[in-house]
Amino acid sequence: MRIGELATRTGASVRALRYYEEQNLLTSERSPGGQRHYPESAVDRIQLIQQLYAAGLSSKAIVELMPCVVDGNATPELLDRLSMERDRIDGNIADLVSTRNRLDSVIAGAGTQLRTGRSCRTKDTGND
């Protein structure tokens, strides 16, 4: 499939697909006219790349783990690197959960204020 079709099917921009090739995350074959052509498997690969980017992995980290994903080849170093990335993501998740909990408290306080007219601040600072 050509680059435009791959972009449409994955939601990635043509520019992103070209970047993925520059970073050695994706490969294409070239037609005699120089057009990029991708195999059907590129759709799944792009989706994985997008998920890994969304999780905060760098293109370098993604390149390092691709042999494991594509060929099933792993090294102890790769396993260590992936474990470190997972720990980092776990930390981000914990931070997000904490932020969500604080936001839930603000929402509850605002809801109480709308229903009762009482201040939605958790502590009265005495500045009223």
Image (spheres, helix red, strand yellow):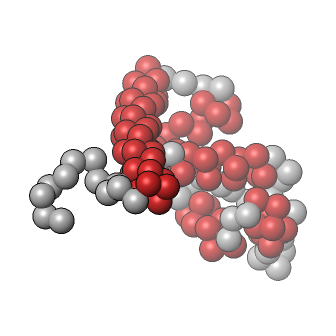
Q: Quadrant of residue 34?
A: bottom right
41 displayed left or right of 87 = right
Q: Position of residue 50 (x, y in %)?
A: 62, 53
Q: Quadrant of the N terminus?
A: bottom right
- Residue shown at the point (41%, 40%) measured from the top left: 101
State the quadrant of the C terminus: bottom left
Name the residue rendered at 14%, 55% in the picture: 125
Q: Is residue 102 left or right of residue 19?
A: left
Residue 40 in the image: x percent, y percent? 86, 51
Residue that extends furthest to the front in the rendered view of this protein: 116
Residue at image x 78%, y 52%?
A: 43
Query: Along the line of sight, which residue is nearer the eye, 125 or 7?
Result: 125
Quarter occupied by residue 52: top right
Figure disc tally: 0
Q: Nearer the viewer, residue 31 or 79?
A: 79
Q: Quadrant of residue 6?
A: bottom right
Residue at image position (40%, 59%) is: 117
Q: Position of residue 74 (x, y in %)?
A: 54, 24
Q: Closest to the observer: 84 or 101?
A: 101
Judge whether residue 9 can be spotted in this image: yes
